[in-house]
Amino acid sequence: MSKTIIICLVGTTGDTLPYFAIGEALKRKGYNVIIGSQKEHEKFVRQHGFDMFLMGDSFTETMANTKEGRALQTTATSQLYAQLRLVMKPLLISWQIAMKKAVETYKPQLAILGSLSEYFGPSIFRKANVPYVVVHPVPAWQTGHFLPATIGRYSLPFRSLNMAVWQLALRVHDHNFLSRLDDEIDAGAGLPLRTAAEKKEAKAARAHTPTYHIVSNELIPQPSDWPAAHLMVGQCILRKDRRIWQEGTKTLLPPSTLIDYNPDAAVETFISKATAAKAPVLYFGFGSMMGGIVGADKSIKTIQSIIDGIAALAQPVSAVIHVTGLEASSIETIKIPEERQGWIFLLRGFVPHSWLFPRCDMIIHHGGVGTTHAGIMYGARKEEGATSDQYEGPVQWVLPPTKITDQRYWGDFITQKQLGPAYVLASKLTVTHVQNAVGEALFGKRRQLWRRNVGRLGLRMWKRKDGSDRIAEEIDQGDLVGLLYLEFKLYVDLTGKTIIVTGANAGIGLEVARYFAKNNAHVVLACRNAEKAQVAISDIKSTTNSGELEFRELDLSSLGSVRAFADEWTAENKGKIDILVNNAGISGRRKFTLTKDNIEEVLQVNHLAPFLLTNLLAPHFINNPGSRVINTSSIQAKKGKLNFNNLDHRKRYTGLKVYNNTKLYNVLFTKALAKKFQSAQSPTVTHSLHPGIVITNIADNMDRVNRFGTKVAFLLAGIDAVAGAQTTIHCAVSKEAGELGTSGSYWSKSAISKTNKIVKDGEKVEQFWKWSAQAVGLKPEKEIGSSIFVPNHLPLAA
């Protein structure tokens, strides 16, 4: 029996098409796909061969036909969020109810959530144990590479500024919209109110929920600072509507839908006449927004400005103006100057972009992401007289009809990428704007540059793999149940596994421990403070219902405590250890500080104590198939130095440099440890990792300058502890990181990464191990790799 996937989406007709492509790709892989959408899309959905459930009240109808929706488009900025809550609250409640009913009715194995359903839908699916992924039609995760899509500009000059704007925008949006509606939405939908911990977890989960941003990588490349779960997969287009690049003839073929397509005779005659008269063809349309979300008055005013602007040009220009969505009485008010009669075509009905856009010299649209893709991709055609893949396309121009969506963003994108003139808000459009923009696009100096940029970009976009195919493959190759807790498809049943996590009472350690507990492991929280550990255990139990949690005292600033921990584990016959996570660590201190072991504090806590702990506990995991040792390092390891004349940091103490060095020591220890395991023919693997710039209290004990710098880094690029835990989790349980061949690797963003080049020097790595053993007084026979660690020589405790 095929697995059922439901797709929950809202928006305009154009918004739904990419999801149909995703559904189509999943159906080809044997899945039963059911689409949730609004009533006005029902015929459209069923024409594409999908079963459908009603996804609550209509977003489009609300925006177009209610007083509150219409007011939203003209609301003052200071009142925008209040009006947005007023409009969206009943919609969100109706969507929640629809999704809840769909889960009960169809019992899906997976849900795909569109943009708006992502924010309030997850609680329904988590409570029903239904995995889900998110699909965004626009780039929707913070980055330094570009701005949020609703800001109205594509990018600022510096990445730090882009990230700062993201951080501010997210906080404002959460404070004024999402958090304000949490309880009201749940109550209105008849759902139990979530606890503060559950709300916090839901927000944090967005970083590591599998999320597909369906924008072409040629338009916007995958940001290097995104979490590994977020992918820019490319545009999603129905297979029948795709153009195919034919390498042999260097030709971009038309889609199969045009093979038997017979265009409207009037449109075809009009364009043929314009071409023969060498009157460039301009297209204008607001898509399915015209006459609806964009009211008739605004639509007519924009159309009239375009016609009058064309009429003001000295050169001949023809125009196809899309008026579908307007009433006949409104269309009749459009005035075409006498000298332009016969050169303006008012288009009623549907004409495929794939047929019309290659015949146009300029495309003017509202700036939706779908039309931006279509204008560039379908408009691409081979340059006249070109013999290779030299392509050009129609100049693009955006007239955003509203400021509350992504339309201005794409308008600015087109300007910055030199695809057309600067965008103008439709409400502020004048005849002069049109005269200048159209004149430059069709007859000006930048005409050829814009045309070539559009055509060559469109060609590159078509050569890319379609995003819908990538998404279907991602879903089909993953374990659907593995998406349940949203950690990178990393759900692994850890029943019977024993895992020790140091520093598990807060931050990354707490979230790592929570993940293991969710997946049925016996988790030992190895912490210094018993009271804080018990609070952490209560927190984890409140979100996981796990009873397999244990606190054991471990103070890494005391080597005696480390030895006591290991001795007690053996004495109590605790048995095998499956995963040891050396997570605890501290920042560089303001001044040189010694522990009672007469060792510099940061060196001991960050490296020597975990080194000793791992060696002393080794008999409990070294012969255990599947066992792993995970060491939390940092990207700062790249800045660390290995100075054998000052490994103990007693000379020239600087807190940040000492921290950097100890993070390098973590990587060196891991590299040496992997070799020791290999020599002992042990099945254990080990990894070091950079968790990301995680917002914790690590800066509290830094000097003033470094504390300020760290907090600035948190502001610009910081992630929460849940997101920061993901690379640790990946190293601990993923199949990829369990391969013996990967042992000793350094990871970042759940992928093997480069670090300090000193780790490639095998002699220095071994020398560093010997120094570490001497520094903690570890007897040679207790070291990993000694004779007692020959496989099966020391049986594991039962």
Image (spheres, grey):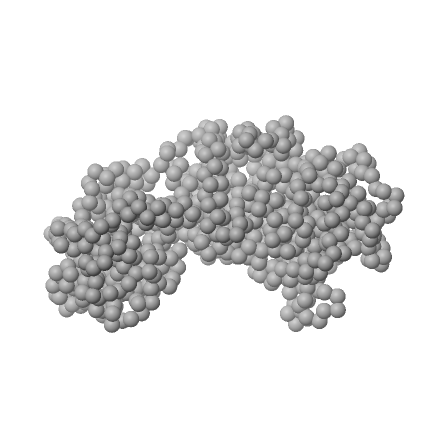
- Return the residue nearer the eye: 243 or 285: 285
- Say whether residue 617 is left or right of residue 127: left
499 relative to 256 in the view: left or right = left
Total residue callouts:
0
Which quadrant is home to the C terminus?
Answer: bottom left
Question: Considering depth in this image, is 635 or 355 the residue closer to the camera?
Answer: 635
Direction from residue 534 to residue 200 in the image, left or right: right
Q: Residue furthest right?
A: 338
At a point 37% along the width and 63% down the height, the residue shown is 754
Question: Residue 241, located in which quarter of the rendered image?
Answer: bottom right
Q: Is residue 499 visible?
A: no
Quarter-of-image position of residue 68: top right
Q: Is residue 729 above or below residue 330?
A: below
**Looking at the picture, how far across and down is residue 432, in whole percent?**
75, 44
Q: Position of residue 64 (x, y in %)?
A: 65, 33
Residue 630 locus on image (x, y percent) = 28, 56
Residue at the image position 66 percent from the left and 36 percent from the top: 293
Q: Residue at the spot x=19%, y=51% of the render? A: 593
Residue at image point 41% right, 38% down:
127
385 horizontally vs 690: left or right = right
Closest to the observer: 182 or 656? 656
Residue 395 visible in rendering:
yes
**Within the image, what quadrant is residue 286 found in?**
top right
Residue 202, image x, y percentages: 41, 40
